[in-house]
Amino acid sequence: MINLSQAGNDMLDPYVARTIRDMPADLISLKVGINIVGLATFRLRTFGPAVHGFLDTIRDGHPDTPLLLMSPVSCPALEATPGPTAMGPDGKIAALGDPADVACGALSLKVVHDELARIVAARRARDPHLHYLDGRELLGPDEAHDLTDGLHPTAAAYRRMGKRFAAHAFADDGPFG
């Protein structure tokens, strides 16, 4: 197993897609969105093409490899409010964007969940090995108490998320089953 975690810098950079493209892989999973929303990196107009380009590059080297694209787990501060973020006085992550800006293309997590689901649905006819998982199935809004700072899961939450991911991804009818 190879983990290309970007430590808060996962921004759909082409060099990461090329790295994945050029490495052997039996399975590929990508979790996209939390850093992008938290740092207000993209707008809706640029996010979709960046996701498509990232997937296209990976598919250049892995046209038939099962690929699971996941949206972010819950983060209450960013569900309906765009970034950027900052640490609040209570030690919890706070979104600094204006929720009204979503109507003008700013990204909240809800927008990212919807856009990633739409992209996968649009690509499935020509890419049957592409799958989508809404990250809220791994850690939902009702489990926000398990985010130490409103963003990062506790150790117990990570264990629960891992079990849920495995149950979904490796089920007989799952993307890697």
Image (cartoon, helix red, strand yellow):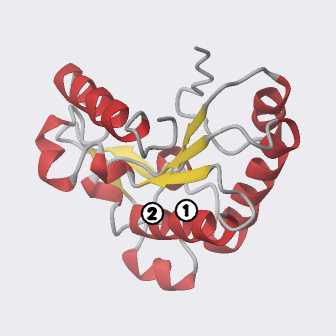
Label 2 packing within 10 angstroms: few (<14), some (14-19), many (20+): many
Q: Quadrant of residue 1?
A: top right
Decide which of 84, 175 is in the foreground and name it. 175
Q: Is residue 108 above or below residue 23?
A: below
Q: Which residue is rendered at x = 51% and y = 43% of the image?
A: 175
Decide which of 157, 137 is in the foreground and name it. 137
**Element class at badge 1:** helix
Q: Which residue is mark 1?
A: 116
| Residue 74 in view, yes or no | no
Res 113 label: 2
Q: Is residue 166 above or below residue 89?
A: above
Q: Are marks 2 and 1 in contact (CB under 8 Å)?
A: yes
Q: Which residue is rendered at x = 61% and y = 38% of the image?
A: 10
Residue 172: percent from left, percent from top? 40, 39
The kind of residue tagged 2 is His
In-image side of 43 versus 172 (left or right): right
Q: Label 2 to label 1, Cα distance in Å?
A: 5 Å
In-image side of 142 versus 137 (left or right): left
| Residue 125 in view, yes or no | yes
Residue 61: percent from left, percent from top? 86, 36
Q: Which residue is rendered at x = 38% and y = 45% of the image?
A: 86
The kind of residue tagged 1 is Leu
Residue 32: percent from left, percent from top? 55, 47
Res 138 label: none
Q: Quadrant of residue 5?
A: top right
Q: Which residue is rendered at x = 49% and y = 85% of the image?
A: 103
Residue 112: percent from left, percent from top? 50, 63
**Element class at badge 2:** helix
Q: Is residue 51 above or below residue 93?
A: below
Label 1 packing within 10 angstroms: few (<14), some (14-19), many (20+): many
Q: Quadrant of residue 125?
A: bottom right
| Numbered-mark total | 2
